[in-house]
């Protein structure tokens, strides 16, 4: 039942693309806020080390970890952000988050009342 509802929600919502620049040691997120639904991060690595991405958010949400993006490389990484709230973007390569490679993304309700 939950899977059916999830499928219906995803089918009804278009994918929002968000550019994400990566370098040592920070992300540049090209949108600060998106509507709830499917979000595709268009990741580009402008740096010299490999980087990746994981999101955490409301209700214990935890995305998969993206593949590593090599220097000069690109990756389109899709996640389903269904709850409104503040999500954290973190690079899981050793020491990267501690050196500042993290960012926030705000997710808003699709149909505000
Ligand atoms: Cu990194």
Image (cartoon, rainbow, N blue to C red):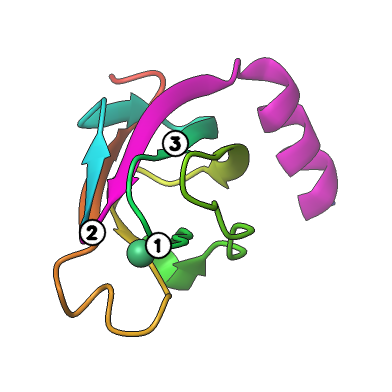
Q: Nearer the viewer, residue 93 or 36?
A: 93
Q: Which residue is mark 2?
A: 24
Quadrant in the picture for the C terminus: top left
Q: Which residues fall within the magenta stretch?
A: 2-25
The residue located at (44%, 73%) in the rendering is 60
Residue occupying the point 32% across, 37% down: 21
Q: Secondary structure at mark 2?
A: loop
Closest to the camera, between mark 3 and mark 1, is 1
- Mark 2, Cα crowd under 10 Å, few <14 / some 14-19 / many 20+, is some
Q: Residue at x 77, y 53 (%)?
A: 2
Whether residue 81 is situated above or below residue 25 in the rendered picture: above
Mark 1 lies within 8 Å of ligand 1 (Cβ measured): yes
Give the image location of residue 107, x and y in percent.
Answer: 32, 37
Per the image, is 6 magenta? yes
Ligand 1 occupies quarter = bottom left
Q: Which residue is mark 1?
A: 49
Q: Residues within 10 Å of mark 3 (few under 14, many from 20)?
A: many
**Residue 31 x %, y %:** 25, 26
Asked whether mark 2 and ligand 1 are closer than 8 Å, the reply comes as yes
């Amino acid at each position: 039942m939950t899977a059916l509802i999830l499928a219906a929600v995803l089918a009804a919502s278009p994918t929002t693309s968000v550019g994400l620049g990566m370098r040592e040691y920070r992300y540049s997120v090209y949108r600060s806020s998106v509507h709830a639904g499917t979000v595709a991060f268009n990741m580009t690595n402008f740096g010299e080390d490999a980087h990746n991405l994981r999101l955490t958010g409301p209700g214990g949400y935890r995305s998969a970890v993206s593949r590593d993006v090599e220097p000069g490389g690109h990756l389109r990484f899709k996640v389903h952000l269904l709850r409104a709230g503040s999500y954290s973007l973190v690079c899981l390569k050793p020491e990267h988050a501690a050196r500042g490679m993290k960012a926030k993304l705000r997710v808003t309700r699709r149909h505000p009342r």
